Image (cartoon, rainbow, N blue to C red):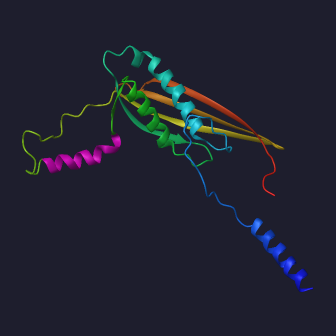
Amino acid sequence: MKSLIVLLVLIAMTHLVGCGPKAFTKGDYDTNVEEENLLNDKWSETDMQKTVETLVNQMVKHRSIARAKKPPVIMVTRLQNKTSEHIDTQSVMDMVRVELTNRSEVAFVDKAAREDVSSEYEYQDSGMVSNTSRKGPGKQVGADYILNGRLDSIVQQVGKNKTVYYKVTLNLTNLSTNLITWTGQKQIRKRYKKKRVGL
């Protein structure tokens, strides 16, 4: 009888351990970050990579950049997130800036650094910096264009089927005229089928 009780207790404990919470405990580096990621139905790095590649290719072919006598100066502002997801849209715009910079097609002014630049001007004008290396206001380059945009999504679900649609629109606005010189768009639609997971 005691042996039977011990056996039942052991079986119960094994069952409880098997049904306990699971955690990701071991991983390795993915050597190809450009491999498509469809792990779930959310905005992914693959969506960002495809979007940036398409929009940058569209932008550099436009006459305002392709036919410019010198690289136009652009100020990147923001990509509005109009989806129901928490998406780091700054990362999208950062990737756009990196891709354009690497192609040497345009130049950028750093809007985010303005406060730091102003503070550094004050420090360099304090007498602590030599006259030969001191920098000051009045020599910054003004932007020719503002680059901004919007990210939208539509989610549709019927039964076990679900589609997720994203649309990213970028606008290049001429600062002198406030006219949109170029606008580009990338659309992505992903299909999913609900399956049972777990035990």
Quarter where residue 1 is shown: bottom right
Eyeballing the image, is 23 above or below 171? below
Residue occupying the far right of the picture = 1
User: Which residue is at a point 84% across and 73% down the rendered structure image?
Assistant: 11
Identified at 59% across, 51% down, the residue is 27
As for residue 118 lying within the magenta part, the answer is: yes
Q: Is residue 183 visible?
A: yes
**Residue 57 point in image, percent of width and height:** 50, 22
Of 154 and 44, the residue lying toward us = 44
What residue is drawn where x is 34% and y is 40%?
111
Q: In this image, 15 relative to 32: left or right?
A: right
Residues rendered magenta in the picture = 111-124
Q: In the shown orientation, is residue 115 left or right of residue 163?
A: left
Residue 121 among magenta residues:
yes
| Looking at the image, residue 90 lies above or below residue 188 | below
Res 17 → quadrant: bottom right
